[in-house]
Image (tube, rainbow, N blue to C red):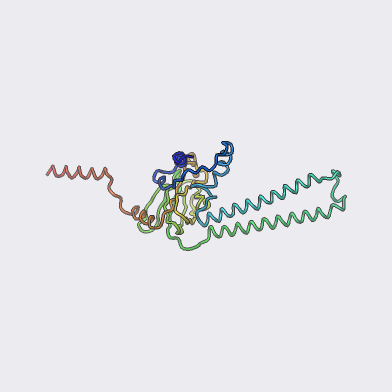
Amino acid sequence: MAPDEHNNNERDRRVPDAVFPLLPSRPEKRVWAPSADLLLTGSSLLSGCAGVQSALDPHSEQADTLAALFWTFTAVLGLVWLVTMAGLLLALTRRRDGRGESAEARPAVKRPMLIAFAAMLASSAIVLSGLAVLSFGGQRTIFGSGAGAALTISVIGHQWWWQVRYEGENGFETANEIRIPVGSPVEIKLTTADVIHSFWIPSLAGKLDLIPGKRNELRIEASKPGVYRGQCAEFCGQQHAHMAIFVVALEPHEFERWRADQAAPAKPTAYLRKQRVFTSALLESSQ
Ligand SMILES: [Cu+2]
C-alpha cells in the first residue's frame, strides 16, 4: 500500500486535522505478493488486530490485561471445542448396531459411560472455575485503586460529541480529544448530559457506560506516546457512529507545555487585533 493511500485510509477513520499529523507514518513494506483473494481474506481477519483502535493492540496495563484474557479464553475454549469435536467424531465412527438400546440394558457399557460423564462434569467445572478466577483477577487490575491519579478529567457525553473538562486549578475544556502524559495514571469521571453513551478506548482500557444521573470512574494510563482512537460503544441516536474521541498520549514535558498553553488566557485573534488597530486609528484621527 502506498504511503498516500495509507494516509487516506487513516483520514477515513475520521481523524481530526489537529490529531492527524501526530499519527506515525508507516513506511511501505512489500515482502511478497499474495493473491488478491488471500490478501482480502487475510486483511479482513487481521484488520481488527492493530491500529489506532484495537483491543488486541494494547498500550496500557489495563488493555494488556484485557488482551491477555481474550487470548487465554480463546485458547482454552478453542481447545475445549477441539476435544468436544474429537469426542463427537469418535462416538459417531464407533457407533454400535444396537440403536435404541439403553445403556442400562448393556452393563458392560454403563460403567465407562458414567466415568465419561463424571470426567466431563469435572473438567467443565475446573475450566469454568479457572476462567472465572482469571476474569476476577483481571477486574482487580483494571478497576484497582492503584496509585493516586496524576490528573483528573471529566468526560461528559452529549448527542453526539464528547465534552472534556480538565479539573483542578487552571482547568480548561476541550472537545472530542483528550491529551494525557505518558506513564501517569489519569482518572476519567464519566457523566452524560442526555442519553446513555459508552466510553471506549480499546487500546487503553475496557468500555464503561455514561449513565444519566450517575457518575462512573475509569482509570487510564498510556505506556507509550501515540494517538488512540475511541468510539461511543452504546447506540445513542442517529449520529452515534460518528461519535469518536481521540486520546493523544504525549511525553510529560510536551503535555505540560500543551496544558500551560490551554490554561493561558485566550490570545486575541487576527480579527480582534485588526479591529483594535482600526479603533485606535479612528480615535487618533478624531482627536
Ligand atoms: Cu453513541
Residue 164 position, x and y percent, is 42, 50
Q: Residue at x 69, y 51 (%)?
A: 80
Q: Is residue 227 visible?
A: yes
Residue 235 in the image: state x and y as whole percent.
52, 43
Residue furthest to the left: 287
For the image, the number of numbered tags is 0
**Which residue is at a point 79% across and 56% down the rendered structure image?**
115
- Percent position of residue 23, x then y: 43, 47
In the displayed image of the protein, which residue is found farthest to the front?
31
Q: Is residue 12 visible?
A: no
- Give the side of residue 7 with respect to residue 131, left or right: left
Q: Residue at x 42, y 58 (%)?
A: 151
Nearer-the-camera pick, 56 or 242: 56
Is residue 225 rendered to the left or right of residue 274?
A: right
Q: Choose between 95 and 175: the one closer to the eye.
A: 95
Most extreme residue toward the top, as rendered? 36
Residue 131 picture quarter: bottom right
Left or right placement of residue 90 versus residue 222 in this view:
right
Residue 285 pos. (x, y %): 13, 42
Quadrant position of the C terminus in the picture: top left
Rendered view: 254 above or below 16:
below
Q: Nearer the viewer, residue 187 or 156?
A: 187
Q: Is residue 102 left or right of residue 268?
A: right
Residue at 58% across / 55% down in the picture?
Answer: 68
